[in-house]
Image: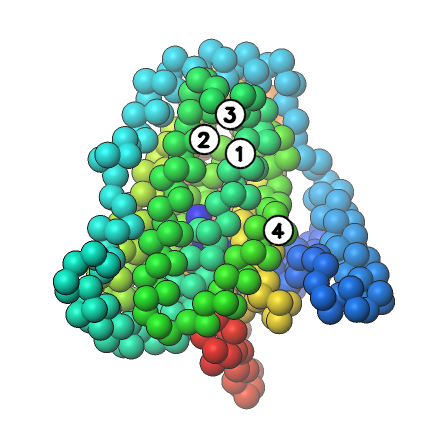
Amino acid sequence: MAVRLASHMNMMMSSTSSTSVVSQSRKRLAFGVDILPPFSITKSTLASPNKLLVSSTLRFQYTMETENLTKSLGSPCPHPRKQSVDEIFKSMESWATDNILPMLKPAKECWQPQDFLPDPCSDGFHDQLRQLQARSKEVPDDCLVVLVGNMITEEALPSYHARLNATDIFHDHTGVDTTPWAVWTRGWSAEENRHGDLLNKYLYLSGRLDMKQVETTIQYLIAAGVDIGTSNNPYLLTIYTSFQERATAISHRNTAKLAMQCGDMKLAQICGIIASDEKRHESAYSKIAEKLFEMDPNGMLVAFAYMMRRKIGMPAHLMYDGKDENLFKHFSEVASRIGVYTAGEYRGVLEHLVGRWNVEKLGGLSSEGREAQDYICKLPNKIAKLEEMRARTPKIKTAPTTVSFSWIFDK
């Protein structure tokens, strides 16, 4: 699952003087960038009581900013009536069993990381390893940074599984529940688990990374958790996952293109096969949302509008390596600069989902539903105009800012 869009949308929004209901600091928060590193107790923290106090205070301020953001949006996190939602999802169980669960692949039919890696049991292992490392030398540092950031995001899967499982409808009460929602969550997590495994092993074998710094970042990210703004609302969750899975697929696909340009066809194949998985997962979540739009169009429109007002932030926005407090922002800027994920693609995902769910054609709506519908349908054009304004804004020549990444030995 990937983090590619936040900083580009932030830069686009900050380039215009349009009146906004949120302050600039809250804009940054809404897009998931410029946030604080995860609070943690380290040896240096324990050695400095003041540092411990400051870290705790800053995390509290971040929580308060999140709450204030919701208030200033003028629309609290929507919570449809629980009984109605439970009834809707209960009525969808047979449909989900027939239409969603078949989108999971049996393990014996799935690719596995070892399919793309040198075989340590073969006589040619060392030759295969030398070939892998020779190919990886041609991958530029910028592309390598994006690959590492994508891999770290994928490795934080425990947080994403926990977030799904914390949503009542998808909650697996026993750990082996047979509802289609619980089965889907476990199956989805099992498939996603291969993504981080494969990228991690391939990048480790490349010999180009400071793996301890990479591993430290993964631990920080999992410990920090994830805040995607969906609360316990399954409507918000299906909208978020539909958007995020498509964004992740685009990011891996574009990274595959860059790897191909560098001549590393095996890496291109790896990124491409992961993108294919993400696209299939996006299709499943989009199908669930599409069905919900049929059954409760008003509730889903309100949820969709809320998520877009809040902005879709990527799940790894709490990324931290113990050094760079703006690591996610810097990673996102690199991804934008080399064309892995840009503001235009954010708009493209929104346009795709608006069309996929026939948002413009939904009828029989309440006044609240019509208001949400109007906002959503006009939003892609508003984003496009902001892109155009930013493109026309004269660029002020400044000395280039160099950002180093601990993952690649502070290059």
Lateral position of residue 180 relative to residue 87, left or right: left
Q: Earlier in the sequence, mark 1 or mark 3?
A: 1
Q: Amino acid at mark 3?
A: Gly
Determine contact: label 4, label 2, CB under 8 Å: no
Where residue 64 sits in the image (x, y, percent)?
78, 49
Disc number at residue 223?
4
Report which residue position mark 3 lands on: 175
Q: Which mark is residue 285?
A: none
Instruction: Tell me which residue sits at (39%, 43%) in the image.
Output: 192
Cα–Cα gap, marks 3 and 4 = 22 Å
Check disc 1 and report the residue beneath it.
164
Q: Is residue 205 above or below residue 22?
A: below
Earlier sequence position, callout 2 versus callout 3? 3
Q: Position of residue 262 (x, y in %)?
A: 25, 72
Camera-nearest label, 4 or 2: 4
Q: Earlier in the sequence, mark 2 or mark 1?
A: 1
Separation of residues labelled 4 and 1 (CA atoms)? 17 Å
Marks 2 and 1 in Cβ contact (< 8 Å) = yes
- Return the residue nearer the eye: 387 or 118: 118
Badge 4 marks a residue whose secondary structure is helix
Return the mark for residue 185: 2
Seen in the picture, residue 245 relative to 126 is either above or below; the reply is above
Upstream in sequence: badge 4 or badge 1:
1
Answer few, some or many: residues within 10 Å of disc 4's Cα (few below 14, many 20 plus, some between 14 and 19). Answer: some
The residue at 51%/38% (across/down) is 161
Q: Nearer the viewer, residue 176 or 354?
A: 176
